[in-house]
Amino acid sequence: FRRLLRALSTLLGTTLVLFVLFRVVPADPAVSIAGPKADPETLAAIRKDLGLDDPVVVQFGRYVWQVGHGNLGRSYLTGRQVRDVIAERLPATALLGLTSLGVGFLLGLLTGIGTAARQGSRIDLAVLMASVVGTSIPVFWVGNLLVYAFGYRLRLLPLGGYGTALHLILPAATLALFQFLSYARFVHTTVGATLASDYLRTARAKGVGPVGLYLRHALRNALIPIVTLLGLDVAALMSGVVLTETVFNWPGLGRLAVQAVFSLDIPVVAGTVLFSAALVLGANVLV
C-alpha cells in the first residue's frame, strides 16, 4: 500500500511539474491552433474554449481530474485524443524495445555469467573494457554509423522507416548493443559478488557441482537486482527511445514526443511524459 501510495504521489508531482513548466514556456496554445496570423478575437475565443482564462488552480484541478479519468486532452495540431495517438504509436515502440532488450539481455546475461566465472582472465578484462567504452558512446552516433555502413555504403538494409523485418534490424541492433554491454557488466559484477559470498564457499565445500553452484545458488540470488533493472528497462524502452527512433525515422512514442516538442503541441508532450512516468512507476512497483 505504501509503494502504491508513493507511486501515485510521484505521478501527481510529475503532473504538477509538467503543468508549471508548460505555463512557463513562452508559447500560446491559441496561436498553435489558429496560426500566427489569426485575429485577436479568434485567439481570445480559443483561449476561452480551452479554459486558459480560468485561474491557474482551477486549470490544474481540471487537468488532474481529466488525467485521472484517462483523458489526456486533444492534440492542438490534429484535434485527436492524445490517448488515441499514443495507442497508435505504442506497437512500434513495443516491437523495437522488446526485440532489442530481449536480444541484449540474453547475450549480456550469458556473457556476464561466463566472465564472472573467469574473473581476472583476459576475456574478462576485455569484456569489461568493451562495456565501459561501449556504454560511453552516444547512441545516436552508433545509429548513424550503422545507417552509413549498412544502409548507405553496403546497401544491405533500409536507411530508416517501418514496416518490414529489415527495417527493424538496424534500430534494434543499435539498442541491443548498449543493452548487451550494460547487462554484461552488471551481471558480471552481481554474479561475481555472489560467488565470493560465504554460503557459496560452503556449498562448494559440501561438494555441489559447478552447474548447481552457478544456477541454483549463485544466479538465483544474483537475479534479484538483475530483474529489478530489467523491469525498469522494459518500462523505459516501452515509453519511447527518443534518439534511436529519431535517427531511424521509427514511428514510435519517442519520435512522437520530438515532433510534438518542435510543433509546441503541449497536450501530446504532456501525454507522452505522463505515460512514460506511469510505466516506470508501475514497473518499479512490480519488480
Image (cartoon, grey):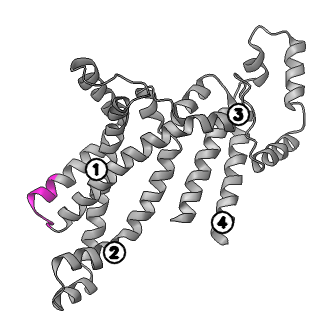
Q: Mark 1 points at which residue?
A: 181
Mark 4: few, some, or many residues within 10 Å (few <14, many ≥20)? few
Q: Would you identify the image quadrant in which residue 183 lies?
A: bottom left
Q: Is residue 74 highlighted in magenta?
A: no
Going from N to C along the chain, the mark reached first, 4 or 3, is 4
Residue at coordinates 81% horizontally, 44% vertically from top-left? 60
- Where in the figure is residue 249, as x and y percent of width and height? 45, 25
Q: What is the C-alpha distance between the residues marked 4 and 3? A: 26 Å
Do the CB atoms of the residues marked 4 and 1 lie less than 8 Å apart? no
Do the CB atoms of the residues marked 4 and 3 lie less than 8 Å apart? no
Q: Would you identify the image quadrant in which residue 34 lies?
A: top right
Going from N to C along the chain, the mark reached first, 3 or 2, is 2
Going from N to C along the chain, the mark reached first, 4 or 1, is 4
Q: What is the C-alpha distance between the residues marked 3 and 2? A: 44 Å
Kind of residue at disc 3? Pro
Do the CB atoms of the residues marked 2 and 4 lie less than 8 Å apart? no
Q: What is the C-alpha distance between the residues marked 1 and 3? A: 36 Å
Q: What element carries label 1?
A: helix
Mark 2: few, some, or many residues within 10 Å (few <14, many ≥20)? few
Q: Is residue 125 highlighted in magenta?
A: yes
Which portion, as a residue range, is magenta? 118-126
57 in relation to 118, above or below: above
- Where in the figure is residue 89, as x and y percent of width and height? 56, 35
The mark closer to the camera, 2 or 4, is 2
Mark 3: few, some, or many residues within 10 Å (few <14, many ≥20)? many
Q: Name the residue under label 4.
A: 4
Q: Is mark 4 on a helix, strand or loop?
A: helix
In the picture as drawn, the residue positioned furthest to the bottom comes out as 206
Kind of residue at disc 4? Leu
Residue at coordinates 39% horizontally, 24% vertically from top-left? 160
Q: What element carries label 3?
A: helix
Residue at coordinates 67% horizontally, 53% vertically from top-left? 11
